[in-house]
Amino acid sequence: MLTSKIKSARLIDLLCLALLLSFAIIIAYPRWRAWIDWRDEGLLAYGAVRVMTGEIPHRDFVSLQPPLSYYTSAAVFKVFGTSLLSLRVFGLSIFLLLPLLIYSTGRNFIGPILCFAAAASACVLGLPYFRFVPFAVWQGITVSFAAALLFIPALSKRQWLAFPAGLLSAISLFLRQDQAVYTAIAIFVLVVATSFTGSVPRNNLQRALLLWLAGIAIVSIPLVVVWWRIGALPEMFRQLIVFPFATYRKTSALPFPILFGQRSCLDAATALLFYLPPLVQAIGSLYIVRSIIRRRFRLREAILTFFVVWSALFYFQVLVRSDLTHLLITLPPFFLLTAFGWSIVREKITHRRTVEMVLSVSLSIFIALFLWILRPVLLPDMSQATELLNLKRGGVRVAKAPVIANLFQSLQTAVPPNRSILALPYQPMFYFLAERRNPTRWNYLWPGDQTARDYENLIAQAERDPPAVVLLSERRAVATFAPTILGYIEAHYDLTDTVGDINVYVRRESN
């Protein structure tokens, strides 16, 4: 009888995973090769190219992301070829893997239907909005979930799984440091909370925790030593730790959206999405406090504590820059929190079938309607005609593809392979698609992010390897926040052409 139930449960899981994968493919298929992100995607793609040429992140070029995301992308380029298509294959793989990880993590505590709902939500409220670009944040989320998936069963059964969980936790730290720290804190909270329940022997908890820490140490210590010896560690500390607190929160902060008074249902639904996570987290926290006061803190409450802490810590990321882009990267733990919380509600009303049915139907209708309203924002518009970008490093479909291809082919003709170009203020995709190097440490300029000394250093670096062409967009903005840079360009270069809002400057022969 027991064997039959186990086989039935496994069959249901396989069916749910197959349906989940099919759902993800349906969403991804018409979208994963569409459009180009000239900024952040270009930053990742060109950063990987710089790594492939032997440059070290943070030491040789400035990066706001940890170094490992560039190395993983470089590895993808080595295997599949250096192109945007290869990068999107990587992104598509992450998109298909993450829902499976969410489902599998949830299945340690929740039934298959709720796990499916949590994972399917990640298919919509996730990478499609980012055009399937494998940004460091999505690499970090995926590895963090894999670490949690391995650590959870290590608490009670197979303690040895905590060791690979630690290895993955360390890897995630060098993919996206903040999410790795949040996940590590949540895992530690899970161990402590479980120890108070008495449901798991303390020896098991201690062994799992020690193996997890050992896994983290085995990866982290050698990497830290290597980066210290090659001179990258001080810059890594400044760019990843000091900069976010000292500068980023001032230059890139965006206000939290106002819930009421929005102009349309779409705007109201988008604003509401910002308030749902803290609302669910607050309800979960109140339930935990109530359980502690009533001395009913059991394993279920320990698990709920884990999800509340994990979701709340992830949500911190949106408090500084409150836009939809940064909100969506905080949601994967929230999906599991919501699913687990709903499982507790269902358990409480299990003898009230009518109430349970009404609540379940109402919640399903609300979620479906909510996602339908958000559809224009979350899923890229596929109605615009696109063509394949016919460049060696292309492989994606964009609007006006022949015009874009002609621009880069002209740029390649005008600039010999041994010469550099400069694309300002933030167009790193030009370096990648034109296959021409950036002579400076900065792949971007942003108002307030760089100091006057940084501008002087950028100019000095450029003059050591004078760019044959400078491509300048947003000229008025650059004149406002970086007049020194604009002055340098106009002193050494002639404006020869304008393509859209991009001014093309060519180096004067006298220089």
Image (spheres, rainbow, N blue to C red):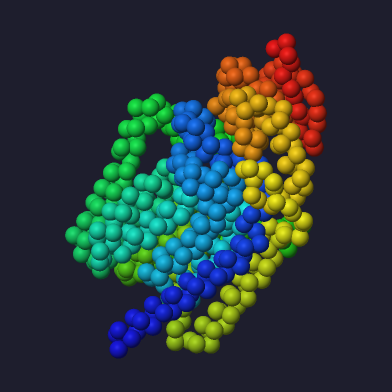
Q: Would you place residue 464 above or below residue 424 in this image?
A: above
Viewer-proximal residue, 30 or 365? Answer: 30
User: Which residue is at a point 51% across and 82% down the rendered structure image?
Assistant: 356
| 316 left or right, relative to 381 | left
* Quadrant occupied by the C terminus: top right
Name the spot of residue 402 as percent of width and height, x first: 76, 45
* Quadrant occupied by the N terminus: bottom left
Name the spot of residue 50 as percent of width and height, x first: 52, 33
The answer, for residue 453, to whether it is visible in the render is no
| 86 left or right, relative to 303 | right
Q: Would you place residue 171 above or below residue 352 in this image?
A: above
Q: Would you place residue 201 above or below residue 112 in this image?
A: above
| 231 left or right, relative to 457 | left
User: Which residue is at a point 65% across and 59% down the rendered structure image?
Assistant: 31
Q: Quadrant of residue 482?
A: top right
Q: Would you place residue 449 above or below residue 40 in this image?
A: above
Viewer-proximal residue, 506 or 301? Answer: 506
| 200 left or right, relative to 57 | left
Name the spot of residue 240 as percent of width and height, x first: 47, 36
Name the spot of residue 142 as percent of width and height, x first: 46, 55
User: Which residue is at a point 75% across and 24% down the rendered structure image?
Assistant: 505
User: Which residue is at a point 55% across and 57% down the rendered structure image?
Assistant: 92
